[in-house]
Amino acid sequence: MGRSVHLEDWGNYLFAPSKRERKVRVVVPEPLDAVAFAREKLGFEPDSLQAEVLASTANRGILNCSRQWGKSTVAAAKAVHRAYTRPGSLVVVASPSERQSGEFLRKVEQMAARLGIPARGDGHNTLSLAMPNGSRIVGLPGTEDTVRGFSAVSLLLIDEAARVPDSIYKALRPMLALGRGDLWMMSTPYGKQGFFYDTWEHGGAGWKRVTATAMDCERISPEFLDEERAVLGAMWFRQEFLCEFVDNGSGVFDRDLVESAIDDSFSPVEGF
């Protein structure tokens, strides 16, 4: 009978000869919750709000957060936890650009390295990490032609969602149909426009909403924020660090004025 190997040692056997692989029986340890997993396995100590995001089991989540709060790091930890603890799962992250998706995958690879998992792609996608348990994490650039073709996605993450076009969002959502996967999006606001703003304001009770301003982050000093407020101006500062959806002035009418004028109880006259 072959000897056993714990999940943490998978990386040593992933690319072993087939005869040796047949002699290895994988023993899966009792899974840790995402917060304990981040602390004990990934060496990441989340703050209270980051821990709330990691611990959440919500099927739909939206994170409205300040610049430099650590949203990509939290999302990467969430991705690694899902892929590591659910064998054969597919995690997909979409970003506005290939460069941003690449940065996200680098965070994922660094975390996976702490688990003894080598940085090896899935053989099909340039930005990807294949895990020994059959799970994959794939990063997609922000073009509609390249995000199609995935199905049964266990976890879909949309990073910098406020800057991802609506057409990409609509192309991504069908990936969740077969596996009834989870969808989390995170971003700093970018005006009162697009699916990120619409979901935050009008997405309904099905979404878990988390706000993380710069004031909630001890890692960002008051001195730095004072400097940024002086340089950026009040409106831009409110958007970048206070998580406010500031109207960018591109429309003829203010977005709040238009929305306040909408009467959902109105019934159109027949024939018009």
Image (tube, rainbow, N blue to C red):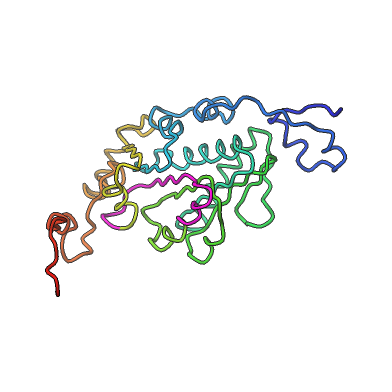
Q: Compared to 122, does 113 lie above or below?
A: above
Side (left or right) of 54 relative to 15: left
Q: Nearer the viewer, residue 26 or 225?
A: 26
Residue 131 position, x and y percent, is 66, 42
How many numbered discs sit on the rendered protein?
0
Q: Within the image, what quadrant is residue 96 found in?
A: bottom left
Q: Residue at x 40, y 57 (%)?
A: 164
Residue 145 to residue 179: above or below:
below
**Quadrant containing the N terminus in the rendered view:** top right
Q: Nearer the viewer, residue 232 or 116?
A: 116
Residue 185 is a magenta residue:
yes
Residue at the image position 55 percent from the left and 46 percent from the top: 91
Q: Is residue 152 left or right of residue 192?
A: right
Instruction: Determine if the magenta segment contains residue 158.
Output: no
Q: Residue 113: which quarter of the image?
A: top right
Write the residue at 45% across / 30% down: 55
Front in this rendered view, residue 14 or 180:
180
x, y (%) of residue 31? Answer: 59, 27
| Rendered location of residue 169, percent (x, y) | 42, 58
Q: Quadrant of the C terminus?
A: bottom left
* 125 in relation to 33, above or below: below
Residue 180 pos. (x, y %): 49, 47
> Which residues make up the magenta segment?
173-193
The residue lying furthest to the bottom in this view is: 271
